[in-house]
Amino acid sequence: MIRCKDCALRRKQLFRPMNGREVGAIGRMKKDDLIVPAGTDVIREGERGQKFYTLYEGWAVRYHRLADESRQILDVILPGDQVGFTPVLLGRSAHSVQTLTPATFCTLDGRALPGVLKANPEMALELLKTWLGEARRADLRLTMLGRMTAAERVGYFLIETYDRLRRRGMVRNGASAFPLRGVDIADAVGLSRVHVMRALKELRSEALLDLEGGDLIIPDFAKLAKFTGYVPIPRSGKRVLV
Amino acid sequence: MIRCKDCALRRKQLFRPMNGREVGAIGRMKKDDLIVPAGTDVIREGERGQKFYTLYEGWAVRYHRLADESRQILDVILPGDQVGFTPVLLGRSAHSVQTLTPATFCTLDGRALPGVLKANPEMALELLKTWLGEARRADLRLTMLGRMTAAERVGYFLIETYDRLRRRGMVRNGASAFPLRGVDIADAVGLSRVHVMRALKELRSEALLDLEGGDLIIPDFAKLAKFTGYVPIPRSGKRVLV
DNA sequence: CGTAATCTTGACCAACGTCAATGTTCGTGG
DNA sequence: CCACGAACATTGACGTTGGTCAAGATTACG
């Protein structure tokens, strides 16, 4: 089991430094790690849960499945992101979470969360800020689905994810591992799989990005950002790691 | 000026009862009321702000305008909803807010907010819960845009708003005032104005809803909910009124 | 080396957008 | 109360984007 004291994530730029008291409070919520293969549903829609998780390593997606079996991917979960917060504080999960790769989650006891937040109001405030940042990102994804063409949607989705990877130090020389398949991208941007492939071809031919063998390459970030209307996440926003 | 002590909103079912200490803390943040005509931009994208607002009476929308002048409506703001939270805690607003009708906002001093939340951790936690609820609603809107047909989108948007109105006691006999025009609905659900009208015609012919003279009528809530896949907001979730 | 998954391509089709002309509603001033 | 204009709704014709289907090529993996 990874101990909070030694957690490698916490040292990353993305996260807000914590004092000993805070690390201790979180450490007391910490339970076993959860190690699962690719394709595992870690959280299922409608489920109640007393535990919540921080993704430590690997990739996952939050998604929603409709009555007609179609799937909407709500968000990509990257290392350092939390899942299962909603069921703990609100009673039930409104979405499922599935791993795309083998993954390790850090498990935390949700029953202790309200107490910890009341005892550490500074942390509660920072957590609120993190969620406001997430809400802002969600607004932009909504705009993408409502108002953009196929190529713009795909480009936006990829550059946004790429930018998040970059902030986590997961990009090297303009490239990063990217385990999503065509279907996954399609389900994220509201298109069909075939049309996503056509959009990718277009983006590739304009040298805006390349996606091959599970690697995403963005040769000119500014150029793709301009094409998609993407504005990078401001450097300032640090996150609480619970 | 409406005093927090006398605020009519606070007494509504939707909101969590507050103790005297909390009402006092909020009262000290309270500044003048803001009374504006329809079509006023209360918050502009990119703006910094030290104040935040609670809509007391009237209607507004949160929206985002793209480079090509097109508009995405992110959400409808109803009495009791806050706006301007993000600029206060995160530095800048990523969206604009415009009134659809003459409206009254309660103005609060944002500089005092972090202090108030740290001094009232219970309130901070409840506020976090409110935001988690909003995030859940946003996920569903995303699903609507990504996976639904024109008629379903329009129906979903209308029933969702109707359900929110209902919780605020703004529905009488299956009907409520509804000041949004065709363009507004179009910009909310990611369709063209003309196509929204066709979708409305279809919904009307199926007796799922009616929209005339600024009134929204839903004769059979369950029937429309089934058609659109809408699940009502659980009764339990009460909101913090700041 | 073989099988399954995924990508690629082309043909065709449905949903939605655009344009433009006509009708309706509503608020305003006479 | 009526006349007028502006904003909005309605309708039909037509164009475009993206969906569906199916067959073949490529890649990943045991």
Image (cartoon, coloured by chain):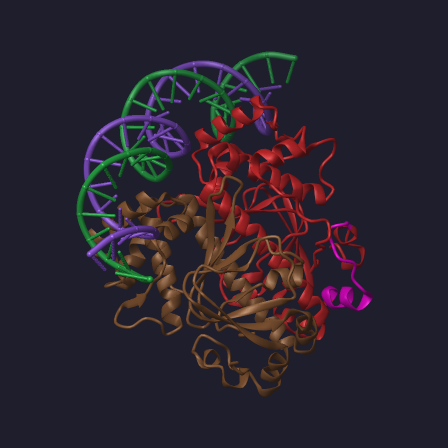
Chain colours: A brown, B red, C purple, D green
Q: Residue at x 32, y 47 (%)?
A: A196
Q: Is residue A105 left or right of residue A152?
A: right
Q: Position of residue B141 (x, y in %)?
A: 53, 46
In magenta stretch: residue B13: yes
Relative depth, front residue between B131 and B1 = B131
Q: Residue at x 69, y 60 (%)?
A: B242
Relative depth, front residue between B179 and A20 = A20
Relative depth, front residue between A199 and A229 = A199
Q: Is residue B41 left or right of residue A147?
A: right
Q: Is residue A131 visible?
A: yes
Residue B169's quadrant in the figure? top right
Q: Residue at x 38, y 64 (%)?
A: A232
Q: Position of residue B102 (x, y in %)?
A: 62, 42
Q: Can you say whether A135 is above or below A114 in the image?
A: above
In magenta stretch: residue B132: no
Q: Is residue B41 visible?
A: no
Q: Can you say whether B145 is above or below A113 in the image?
A: above
Q: Can you say whether C8 is above or below A14 in the image?
A: above
Relative depth, front residue between A43 and A134 = A43
Q: Is residue B93 left or right of residue B22?
A: left
Q: Position of residue B165 (x, y in %)?
A: 67, 42
Task: Give the magenta part as a residue range.
Answer: B12-27
Q: Residue at x 56, y 39 (%)?
A: B157
Q: Can you say whether B115 is above or below D23 in the image?
A: below
